[in-house]
Amino acid sequence: MTTLVDLTGMLRAERVEIIDLTNKLTQNTPSLKLPFPFGSPAPFELEEISAYDDRGPGWKHNNIHIGEHTGTHLDVPIHWASGRDGDDVSQVPLTRLIGPAVVLDVTAEATEDADFLVDVHHVQAWEAQHGPLPPGAWLLVRTGWSAYSQDEAKFVNRDEIGPHTPGFTAACAKWLAESPMVVGVGVETLGIDAGQADKLTPPRPMHHFLLGGDTYGITSLQNLDRIPTTGAVIIVAPLPIVGGTGSPARVLALVERDN
């Protein structure tokens, strides 16, 4: 109990900073749009029910309309065919939603090449410099893509052959899914796979390997430039949707500061 009390004191004293890694939900928040005949998640919409008027004179409230996979959201195993027998979002063990966060910064590479893919050797080089990934790690990959998080055209970066956003090689996706240390992978882009990942083998390998390997994904993260390479703690808070393949989530980082 002393440790938890100490934590609350550190939060009040701002010795531990809470950093919001969540993209705000607005009408401009980019959402996935799949080509016909595939269905797409609903974009975010706020529907007013009343606003201190004849529909409700003393109160204001809204309905929200949103797809499971819109905005900053958690992907869980049953989202993909390879994980169809796994957990829905309500069944995710709570201990896996809080853990050490490490940041792999490939902003320079992604700036030079929008189709840049993180490979196994990039993660291994990170480990050679910073030490092994900690048990229960959330690997957060910084690409700079969060700068476009309220500009759908730049965020999706689509041309005549499709979207162009950074992601992971199939080999890296498989390696991460098989790592006993990794609980989840977080990205700043619209999805956990690269924009051109349909051309990889297997198509969309992050979805195929991670979710098939009981490893989670988080998308559309913000403020990764504000958390250290190692030492932060991540808190992922999805809605416990029974049967849900994912959920919009509030994602927070706790970072200890020297005062």
Image: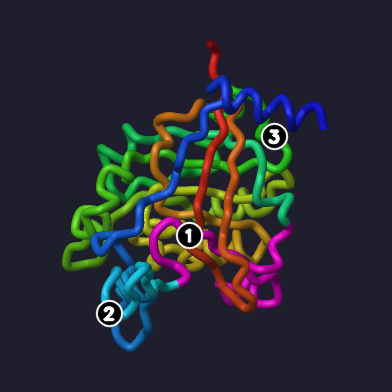
At x 32% / y 66%, what residue is drawn? 31
Residue underneath mark 1: 73
Q: Local crowd at mark 1 within 10 Å, few (<14), some, or many (≥20)?
A: many
Against 192, residue 85 (above or below) is: below
Amino acid type assigned to the residue bearing label 2 in the image: Asp
Q: Residue furthest bottom?
A: 37
Task: Select label 1 or label 2 by which is in front.
Answer: 2
Residue 89 or residue 125, whichever sits in front: 89
Task: Select label 3 or label 1 by which is in front.
Answer: 1
Q: Is residue 227 left or right of residue 134?
A: left
Residue underneath mark 3: 134
Residue 158: percent from the left, percent from the top? 21, 62
Residue 174 or residue 39, whichever sits in front: 39
Residue underneath mark 2: 54
Task: Identify the element where label 1 is drawn.
Answer: strand
Amino acid type assigned to the residue bearing label 3 in the image: Pro
Q: Local crowd at mark 2 within 10 Å, few (<14), some, or many (≥20)?
A: few
